Image (tube, rainbow, N blue to C red):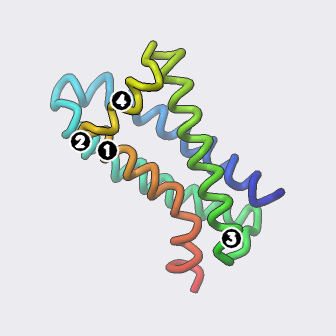
Amino acid sequence: MSVFLAGVAYFASVFAVGFLLGSLRVLILEPALGPLAAVLIETPFILSASWLLCGYWVRRFAVAAATAPRLLMGFSAFGFLLLAEFILGEYGFGRSLSEQLSAYKETPGALGLAGQILFGLFPLFQARIVEK
């Protein structure tokens, strides 16, 4: 259960940072530079925050370095992130699920999805890279 809770905490903390950075991206960077440049600027910041927060929650919940617990933590966080993104898109921005999914076909959306997949794999990567 603590592995699942680590995933929830990881998701919630990164979502909060992502909400802040995403707001800055949409309100400031996109109008000035366009969607692709804005995502390229934002991505290293959110991935860096994700890496640091992942390490914190792994230690806080003492998540074992074995593959299964790390994947459970990462996949649960990734699942909650996608769910939150779809809910926010639907109710916050009035975009249907199909509209949100079609955004992944565009380069900025594909880059964002790639970053989210990395976010979900960070718990496993940290077990293999950092904790050896």
Q: Which residue is located at x 40 percent, y 33 percent?
A: 101
Q: Which residue is mark 4?
A: 24
Which numbered marker is on residue 68? 3
Q: Is residue 16 above or below residue 10?
A: above
- Tell me if 60 is positioned left or right of 99 in this view: right
Q: Percent position (x, y) of residue 78?
A: 56, 49
Instruction: Compare marks 4 and 3 and give the one earlier in the sequence.
Output: 4
Disc 1: which residue: 110
Q: Which mark is residue 28?
A: none
Would you call the spot at circle 4 few (<14 residues within 10 Å), some (14-19), or many (20 or more)? some
The reply to whether discs 2 and 1 touch (Cβ–Cβ < 8 Å) is yes
Q: Amino acid at mark 2?
A: Thr
Mark 1 or 4: in front is 1
Q: Please, which residue is most extreme toward the bottom here? A: 132
Which residue, as the protein is rendered here, is positioned at the far right? 1
Residue at mark 4 to residue at mark 3: CA–CA distance = 36 Å
Mark 1 / mark 4, whichever is N-terminal: 4
Q: Nearer the viewer, residue 50 or 64?
A: 64
Residue holding disc 2? 107
